[in-house]
Image: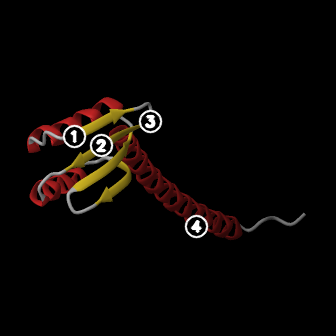
Amino acid sequence: MKKLDPLYVILLSIVVLIVSIILFNSSIKKLNKSQDELKNISLIAINYSNMKNDWNDKKNTIIKIDQIIRSLKIKRIDKKITKKKIKIKIEDVSSNNLDKFINKVLNKKLNILKLDITNNSISLEVGI
């Protein structure tokens, strides 16, 4: 048998080392990319959870509506609370008060199902 030249063995070892380093670096890049995607997904999940808590909190929704009504001191309000929604009907109120009411309702985080506006009345349905 022929003897292997030590130079060939060293050269082969260097080639194997270079290929190993290249493959290792590419796997590190893939790992970093996966970690960044995981961070983005967790941020989206946290935002979704916060939004779900804001929109699905029945007590908080009722409190927000009551605060809006109390702040405007409107006396002729018909408010009915059912299992899935709150119906509010305001009639014979000045356009200024109607405008303030609409602005406050639209600026709150409420699930508005229906909103009917006429000259001097509002019919509003808010999901709970």
Amino acid at dot 1: Ile
- Give SS at disc 4: helix
Residue placed under numbered mark 2 in the picture:
88
Q: Is residue 31 visible?
A: yes
Which three-letter amino acid code belongs to the residue tagged 3? Lys
In contact (CB < 8 Å): disc 1 and disc 2: yes
In the image, is residue 67 above or below residue 96?
above
Q: Amino acid at mark 4?
A: Ile
* Residue identified by numbered label 3: 84
Q: Residues within 10 Å of mark 4 (few under 14, many from 20)?
A: few
- The residue identified by callout 4 is 18
* Whether label 2 touches label 4, CB < 8 Å: no
Check disc 3: other Cα within 10 Å, few if <14, some if 14-19, many if 20+: few
Residue appearing at x 18%, y 57% in the figure: 103
How far apart, in angstroms, are the residues tagged by discs 1 and 4? 79 Å
Tags 1 and 4 touching, CB below 8 Å? no
Relative to residue 108, is residue 26 depicted above or below? below
Q: Helix, strand or loop at disc 2?
A: strand
**Mark 1 packing: few (<14 Cα in 10 Å), some, or many (20+)?**
some
Residue tagged 1: 77
Residue 1, given in percent of the width and then of the height, sits at 90, 63
Q: Is residue 106 visible?
A: no
Percent from the top left, x then y, of residue 90? 23, 47
| Separation of residues labelled 2 and 4 (CA atoms) | 73 Å
- Quick one: label 2 or label 4, which is nearer the N terminus? 4
Label located before the other in sequence (3 or 4): 4
Q: Gap in Å between the C-alphas at discs 3 and 2?
A: 13 Å
Image position of 26 (left or right of 41): right
Under circle 3, the secondary element is loop
In 3D space, how far apart are the residues under numbered discs 3 and 1 (Cα atoms)? Answer: 19 Å
Three-letter code, disc 2 = Ile
